[in-house]
Amino acid sequence: MNKYFPVRGLAIAGLIAALYVVFTLPFGQVAFGPIQFRIAEVLTLLPFFTPWAIPGVTIGCLISNLLFSTVWDVLFGSLATLVAACFTYRSRKILIAPLWPILFNGLIIGTMLTFMLNGSFAWLPWLTMVGEVAASEFVVCFAIGVPFLRMIDRYNLQRFLTVS
């Protein structure tokens, strides 16, 4: 059991999931909708350093959406986070890593919101929703996320995220 699911890895994933929920709680009013400044999205960049962050941010997003949002956001928001985290893990440059949460949240959440708010697909509302979600994700991931990743890298804090 420990060979495939090391206790340290599970603890890292659990801690990241808990932090995601805690960072979403106080900002619930601005963390959902077309323009969403979800500070917890900074944590979606942690898969850059460890694969254990992938289940951590996905479960954290799922729990946050269960507490604050709709069943559609639970499904599609968690899916967007999972896909973005997997691509972020594959990134090799710090400035590329934030592009995946921006892209996948913009497309998936923007499409979901278009159908939820309009009841059908239309190009202009879809482009607006995708743009608003991607723009707010851009602010969080680049204004806060890139300095966060650089700090982790500069001070060699990724050593706390590794599982041997």
Image (cartoon, grey):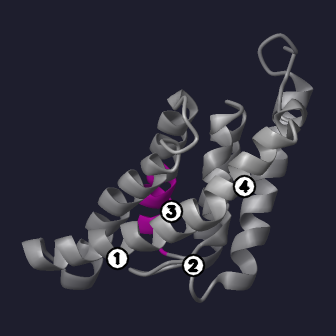
State the quadrant of the C terminus.
Answer: top right
Q: Find numbered disc 2 in the image and state the secondary structure of the residue it sits on.
A: loop
Q: Earlier in the sequence, mark 3 or mark 2?
A: 2
Q: Position of residue 88 (x, y in %)?
A: 53, 38
Residue at image point 77% right, 14% down: 4
Q: Earlier in the sequence, mark 3 or mark 1?
A: 3
Question: What residue range appears in magenta?
Answer: 70-80
Is 91 situated above or below 121?
above
Residue type beneath disc 1 = Glu
**Pointer 3 residue:** 74
Q: Position of residue 160 (x, y in %)?
A: 90, 35
Residue type beneath disc 4 = Phe
Query: Quick one: label 1, few (<14), some, or many (20+) residues within 10 Å?
Result: some
- The magenta stretch spans residue 65: no
**Pointer 1 residue:** 132
**Pointer 4 residue:** 148
Front disc: 2 or 4: 4
Residue type beneath disc 2 = Ala
Q: CA distance from mark 3 to mark 1?
A: 19 Å
Query: Quick one: label 2, few (<14), some, or many (20+) residues within 10 Å?
Result: many
Q: Earlier in the sequence, mark 3 or mark 4?
A: 3
Front disc: 3 or 4: 4
Name the image quarter holding residue 68. bottom right
Is 3 situated above or below 80?
above
Q: Is residue 122 visible?
A: no
Q: Position of residue 78 (x, y in %)?
A: 51, 54
Front disc: 1 or 2: 1
Front disc: 3 or 1: 1
Q: CA distance from mark 3 to mark 4?
A: 26 Å
**Pointer 2 residue:** 31
